[in-house]
Image: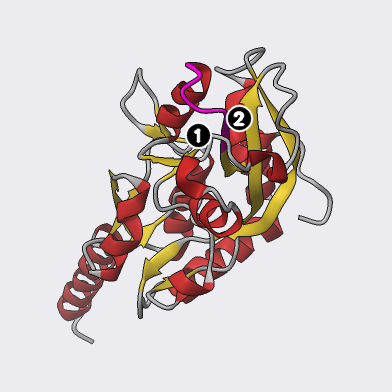
Amino acid sequence: MNNKWLKTVGASLALTVAAGTVSAETLRVVTDPSFVPFEMMDQETGEMIGFDMEIIREVADRAGFEIDLNTMDFNGIIPALQTGNVDIAIAGITITAEREEIVDFSDPYYDSGLRILVRKGNEDVTEFSDLEGKKIGTKIGSTSYDYLTENIEADDGVTPYPGSSDMYMALMSRAIDAVFYDAPNVGYFARTKGEGKVQTVGPLYEGQQYGIALKSGSEWVDDVNDALAAMKEDGTYKTIYEKWFGPMPEGK
């Protein structure tokens, strides 16, 4: 047997394996940098951190792709996927029938809903019906904006803001009477920068599920779903969840 030939074949195989290791496909991933604690900029490192960021990095490792992460305003995310300018988006994106017509979604990875936020001591707003005739802030392109315009008769008082920090600032400065937005983001603000100044009121409205959005026809949907399922099975998802939100509800 030609040992020289075997060595040559062995070397070629090693190079092929090495090349495969370093040439994992890079996917263009986009997020909205203002949806805390799901995604936010670490001011010291300049790195995007948060629940979603840990989820997508773990999913990428397990599914076998690298990520080229960029940020944009939330209202531009679905159009960017639709035109193929990005491959994947994760930004607390609610799975809706309308969005499913133009992009693909992973299996749900977070259960959410909508919540009202008012200034501390406000007794005029305790439930959704009290928002009628009030000045309400929400986020451009969000399901909370859709919900408001569909369920508030005098919706001329609804102001959509480009970022969540803008609408919270408007609430604190009394430019608006209330904020209506995704419950985890509203709750996080109330527990952090808004502590003692604002409060959440009323129940959760319109139960929602977040999904990782992919451009229509993406070949990565099954791999992303397999990664999410494995993370939940081995406890990785629970560890990440409890880092950002505290004890995970039973049955999740």
Does the magenta stretch mainly form a helix, a strand or a loop?
loop
Could you say which quadrant of the image residue 63 lies in?
Answer: bottom left
Q: Residue at x 44, y 55 (%)?
A: 61
Is 6 left or right of 50, judged from the image as shown? left
Mark 1, Cα crowd under 10 Å, few <14 / some 14-19 / many 20+, is many
Is 107 left or right of 104, judged from the image as shown? right
Where residue 248 appears, x then y in whole percent?
Answer: 76, 43
Could you say which quadrant of the image residue 216 lies in?
Answer: bottom left
Q: Which residue is mark 1?
A: 36
Where residue 202 appears, x then y in whole percent?
Answer: 76, 39
Q: Residue at x 48, y 57 (%)?
A: 59
Q: Which residues are magenta?
A: 173-179
Task: Give the number of the disc on residue 188.
Answer: 2
Quarter holding the N terminus is bottom left
Q: In this rendered view, identify the residue nearer to me: 62 or 168.
A: 168
- Does the magenta segment cover residue 177? yes
Of labels 2 and 1, earlier in sequence is 1
Q: In this view, which residue lies farthest toward the right?
A: 250
Where residue 112 appears, x then y in whole percent?
Answer: 65, 51
Q: Residue at x 33, y 56 (%)?
A: 77
Residue 187 in view (yes/no): no
Tell me the SS state at disc 1: loop
Residue 13 in view (yes/no): yes
Q: Residue at x 55, y 17 (%)?
A: 193
Image marks 2 and 1: residues in contact by CB distance under 8 Å: yes
Tell me the SS state at disc 2: helix
Q: CA distance from mark 2 to mark 1?
A: 7 Å
**Kind of residue at badge 2:** Tyr
Q: In this rendered view, identify the residue nearer to me: 197 or 44.
A: 197
**Kind of residue at badge 1:** Val
Question: Is 224 located above or below residue 186 in the figure?
Answer: below
Question: Is 64 located above or below residue 114 in the figure?
Answer: below
